Image (cartoon, grey):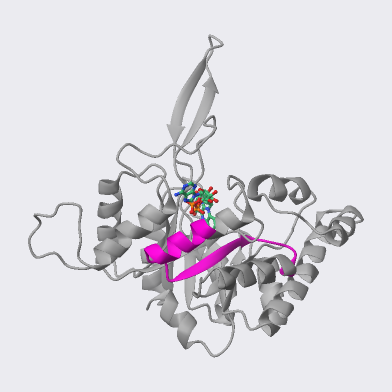
Amino acid sequence: MKVIDHLTNAKETIFSFEILPPLKGQNIEHIFNSIDPLLDFNPPFVNVTYHREEVVYKRLDNGLLEQKVVKKRPGTVGICAAIQNKYKIDAVPHILCGGFSKEDTENALIDLAFLGIENVLALRGDSLKGETYFVPEKQGHTYAKDLVKQIKDMNEGIYLDEELQNKTPTNFSIGVAGYPEKHFEAPSLNNDMQRLKEKVEAGADYVTTQLFFDNQKYFDFVDRARAAGITVPIIPGIKPVATKRHLSVLPHFFHVDMPDELISAIAACKDNKAVRQVGIEWGIQQCRELKEAGVPAIHFYSMGKVDNVQKIAEAVF
Ligand code: FAD
């Protein structure tokens, strides 16, 4: 079933979460172990992130550096198929512009359609380490909006090769990313909102937001989106803080602010066990308020460890 239908049919806020494929070499039990404890909260869909290749350097005996391109977390499509097969829950693979030509994208979508996967979250992806700006693959897309358009075209039976015979339309529900605190490359909040509107006009059915720690940022974002004419559901993204290091890592990687009250509470913690508890309590507070405001779903960034997500869900769902 499509995510947009889950959202439209739901009578109350849906619990949902995303998982990362395991590091290369680990087995799929690792993934199942992080899904199992969350099944009690009836997630109708689970997102699976996509990780593109990375450039790594190995120092050789002669002191020179060898450059290697590796994919540390492959397996997004296989995990999605395994989730649907084992749990009968819809899987939402993330699909990127980065590293994909239009032809690669078309073939990936054909694989997903053949596996019975009806949902994708369409993203641009970040630049590779060492690149200042995002560089699209040759014959690939520069912006998520163009990826959305390609998926939408396939949903209408339009493939890259116009001469193909007996073309079967695909049937994907398309989600896109939104940034309550602005995407870091965008010149202004307003400009970023116009870009989001373009993604929705290209065919996105719903928006999932970047993580945030201050609900007011989400509520303002939704108000601005509605004022800009974006009417699709906007799912808030929540990440419970779990370590002291998150104080610097999360703002750095996700370009989000942390409220001073949360920073002080984390700074006062003796160890990471105490920080985890602060993160759980903050998450419960955030989610209760979001649920009361009638958000369509809450999307948890689990990043592999789910005990804190489980504690929040127990208190809220
Ligand atoms: P876009 O919507 O293409 O926007 C990127 C930038 O370009 C923005 O600043 C936008 O304002 C600007 N822009 C858009 N259109 C135009 C235009 N026509 N002209 C000029 N500027 C324009 N990354 C991964 O690698 N794997 C994942 O699985 C993953 N999952 C994610 C899930 C969620 C919910 C979110 C919020 C992010 C996720 N990301 C993931 C990160 C995402 O790939 C990055 O944030 C990326 O930098 C931007 O992706 P986007 O789809 O928002 O890009």
Q: Is residue 213 magenta?
A: yes
Residue 295, image quadrant: bottom right
In the rendered structure, the answer to whether residue 231 lies left or right of residue 300 reads left
Q: The C terminus lies in which quarter of the figure? A: bottom right
Q: Position of residue 52 (x, y in %)?
A: 45, 44
Q: Position of residue 199 (x, y in %)?
A: 44, 60
In the image, farthest residue toward the top: 62
Decide: is 215 above or below 123. Answer: below
Tell how many labels.
0
Residue 119, image quadrant: bottom left
In the rendered structure, the answer to whether residue 121 lies left or right of residue 178 reads left
Q: The N terminus lies in which quarter of the figure? A: bottom left
User: Which residue corresponds to the image point at 57% horizontal and 77% vertical from the top-left?
Assistant: 297
Depth check, front residue: 115 or 61: 115
Q: Is residue 176 magenta?
A: no
Q: Position of residue 168 (x, y in %)?
A: 17, 67
In the rendered structure, the answer to whether residue 311 lies left or right of residue 60 reads right
User: Which residue corresponds to the image point at 56% horizontal and 54% vertical from the top-left?
Assistant: 191
Q: Which residues are magenta?
A: 194-215
The reply to whether residue 19 is visible in this rendering is: no
Decide: is 134 above or below 290. Answer: above
Decide: is 195 above or below 61. Answer: below
Decide: is 278 above or below 128. Answer: below
Q: Position of residue 82 (x, y in %)?
A: 38, 65
